[in-house]
Amino acid sequence: MMEFEPGVAGGIQRTRKPGLPPNTPDVPLTDSGEVSTMLADCINRLRRGELDPRVANSIGYLAAVQLRCFDQALLHERVTNVENTLGLTQPRPIIHAQAVGEETPTDESRKPNKES
């Protein structure tokens, strides 16, 4: 039977490749060009062994999410412009009574009765 040394954790202690240094400046990432520049820097650091592949993978994933956000914002702006051009308005929010199937007063029944 093998004896274990007390206080020694199981498994092999592996050294981790570094993440980004703490003094790495923030990148604004306000457009796709800045995202591309940041990705190029991360790719080069990864290739030189200066960046842990897991960190690079996380950065790549988050960069893809950021790029999709840019696309969504552009699409939203374009749809809003088309709606404004066509004179379309935003739909009124559904009130609780409509959601549960109860009858709601119509626009006609909300008008004051002029016959009285």
Image (cartoon, grey):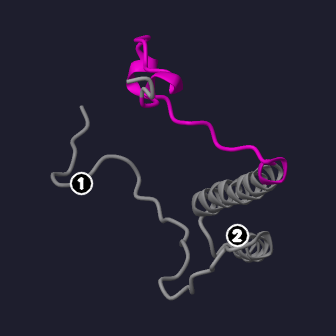
Q: Residue at x 40, y 58 (%)?
A: 13
Q: In the rendered image, which quarter contains the C terminus?
A: top left
Q: Which residue is drawn at 47% across and 83% down?
A: 22
Q: Where is residue 103 in the image (x, y as percent from the top left)?
A: 43, 12
In this orientation, which residue lies closer to the viewer: 109 or 32?
A: 109
Q: Position of residue 91 (x, y in %)?
A: 62, 37
In the picture provided, is 75 more to the left or to the right than 60? right
Image position of 23 with respect to 114: above or below: below
Q: Tell me if residue 28 is in the magenta stretch.
A: no
Image position of 21 with respect to 71: above or below: below
Q: Which residue is drawn at 46% across and 59% down?
A: 14
Q: Residue at x 43, y 18 (%)?
A: 104
In the picture provided, is 87 more to the left or to the right than 90? right
Foreground mark, 1 or 2, reads: 2
Q: Which amino acid does label 1 sit on?
A: Val
Q: Mark 1 points at which residue?
A: 8
Q: Name the residue under label 2.
A: 46
Q: Is the residue marked by circle 1 packed among few (<14), some (14-19), or many (20+) residues within 10 Å?
A: few
Q: What residue type is labelled 2?
A: Leu
In the picture provided, is 19 more to the left or to the right than 7? right
Q: Which residue lies furthest to the front in this view?
A: 116
Q: Give the range drawn in magenta.
A: 83-112
Q: What element carries label 2?
A: helix
Q: Which mark is residue 76?
A: none
Q: Position of residue 5 (x, y in %)?
A: 20, 51
